[in-house]
Image: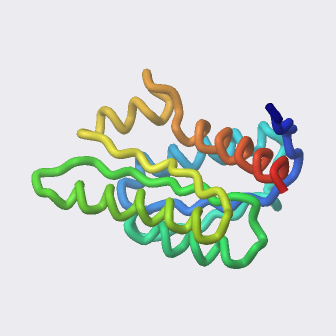
Amino acid sequence: MQVIKVTRVEKAPVAIVVSRFNSPITDELLKGAVDRLRELGLGTEDITVLYVPGCVEIPLAAKKLAQTKHYAAVIALGAVIRGETSHYDYVCEQVSAGCQEVMLETGLPVIFGVLTTENKKQAEERVGGSHGHKGRDAADCAMEMISVMHAVK
């Protein structure tokens, strides 16, 4: 059996695509992600933030960033909170499938940090509440995947 050794990559430019919709939540996701990336050694020059109107627009923005070949990973941040219509289901499906498609087409890690919750309280619990901080988790995932991608070159 062969085991590939993964070592931490110290410096790697990361792009973050963040939805402005549900901004009280997405602002907290972004703050957590940026704070964690800084804690892990990235400088402000290593982090690019691109805002989009809503979650459905995240995959296209992620693809454009990936195509620049400047970034080692893209973090997708957003919040889809269930309402009274089936719109929630369509948005969740489109953004998750779109991010996966970008990742598989480009070979660049696209980290899915989009909250899909039943209500605002659940979303708030995931940006520093009882369920941790998903923005910070997305940053950790990005750095680990960057390391993985370097290990299997």
Q: Quadrant of residue 138?
A: top right
Q: Quadrant of residue 15?
A: bottom right
x%, y% of residue 123? 36, 38
x%, y% of residue 82? 22, 48
Instruction: Give the side of residue 140 with respect to residue 110, left or right.
Output: right
The residue located at (59%, 46%) in the rendering is 31
x%, y% of residue 122? 32, 33
Depth check: give the residue in front, 63 or 149: 149
Q: What's the colour scheme?
A: rainbow
x%, y% of residue 12? 82, 55
Count every numbered label the image shows and give the total. Answer: 0
Depth check: give the residue in front, 101 or 90: 101
The residue located at (30%, 41%) in the rendering is 117
The residue located at (71%, 47%) in the rendering is 145
Q: Quadrant of the C terminus?
A: bottom right
Q: Relative to 36, does residue 42 appear above or below in the rendering?
A: below
Q: Quadrant of the N terminus?
A: top right
The residue located at (43%, 21%) in the rendering is 130
